[in-house]
Image: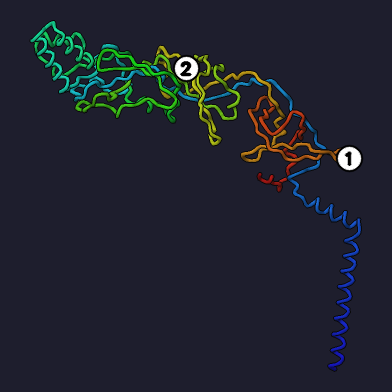
Amino acid sequence: MRKTIFYITLGLSIFIYGCQKQLHDEHNKHGSHPEGEANMKALSISAEPTNWKVISSQTIVKPIKQLQSSPINAYGFISLDERRSNQVAARVSGRIEKLYVKYENQFVHKGDKILELYSPDLNTNQEELLYAHKVDPDGEITKHAAHKLKLLGITDAQIKQIIESGKTLFTLSIYSAYDGYIFYNPSSQVSSSKPVMTSASGSSKMGGGMGSGSQEKSASSSMSSSSGPIREGTYVSAGQTLFWINDLREVWGILSVDNLHQDEIILNDSVTVVSELIPEKPFSTVIRFIEPQYTSSQKFIQVRVYLPNPSSSLRINSLLEATILSKTKESLTLPASSILYLGGRQAVWKKVSQTEEGAHILEIRFVKLGPVSQGRVVVLGGLQADDEVALDAGYLMDRESLVKPE
């Protein structure tokens, strides 16, 4: 019985080994056959990702060079024209005894009394004038003392009053040297980040009162602001900015333009601006300044236009709509249907070769696009004028295809 089981087991083992060897030999035989190699090659080709290359009989188109001058829409707001802001600063240190400016944006006329300032230093200089006039009324020392008071903001009429009365003025009355609106902090008047200033040479003008200056700001500096709203009883130091006066007869329009148009807009492009406050009165102007700094993460670039505002109808931070007419230039364009939108990137199916049957072999190509106008999109990079692409890019992507990131 045991011998019978042993022989049966041995026979089955020999049979199984023989079958496996035969299958292995047949596999090697077919593997070395040319037809087998072709089948394996075809299998490897078909295993390539379908999203890299496709074969299609779809219509092929070439980029067309066209003259582009499509309008560009932009939105923005009204900001202060900082060239028209006149600084009012303290010429001497002291304490504000009386303040006639009650609130920001209050309008003042030239010659209006703004504040009264008590200053021990100013009183000392007045005493020097009275002593010099008593010793030598027409001498150089008297003239020097009077000139010193003028530099501190004392007017000729006030100097005459001091000499005739023989008494010092307890407080110094400060008068506005300009017509305009009061601003404690001009940079806080804009609703977005501080706009970049144009480069210009600085200048200052001295007038009556405590001291004032009109300055144009450079691109690397912003308008200095006061330390905050001043109040009665506040102590100020010599040179401290008290506030600014701006007549708002001309204002800036700060417009945000989609960064797709950064290569299209240039200085002096024509702009039509419509204010939300007076929509029936559009303004025709030109681009006077383009933001010099740009990063790829920005979605918008800022441009500046100058708007006349003689009646003060344009208010700070009021909203604007604008249409920019860029200069006509030649650009490569494609039908909008040729573009495949893949999240933050855009691509086309570019023809790279052709099959024997005449079908097109297409390969994915990423492109950089400009604006879309009348069903065509401007191609800024990624294609040449003699390239050919599929007309309908979306039909060549199945639901499970994903373009491999670069």
Which residue is identified by label 2? 306
Nearest to the observer: residue 378 or residue 406: 406
What residue is shown at x 39% (from left), y 18% (from top)?
202
Does residue 215 appear left or right of residue 236 in this picture? right
Judged from the image, the secondary structure of the residue bearing numbered disc 1 is loop
What residue is shown at x 53% (from left), y 34% (from top)?
295
State the count of labels. Answer: 2
Nearest to the observer: residue 323 or residue 294: 294
Q: Which mark is residue 163?
A: none
Determine whether 35 is above or below 280 in the image: below
Residue at far front of view:
140
State the CA–CA distance, disc 2 to disc 1: 63 Å
Residue 133 x, y percent position in the rendering: 11, 10
Classify 10 Å Cα crowding around label 2: few (below 14), some (14-19), many (20 and above). many
In this view of the protein, can residue 158 be seen by the observer? no
Image quarter of the N terminus = bottom right
Determine whether 272 is above or below 20 in the image: above
Image quarter of the C terminus = top right
Does residue 203 appear left or right of residue 57 in this picture? left
Q: Amino acid at mark 1?
A: Glu
Dot placed on the residue nearer the N-terminal end, 2 or 1: 2
Quadrant hosting residue 6? bottom right
Q: Which mark is residue 357?
A: 1
Q: Amino acid at mark 2?
A: Tyr
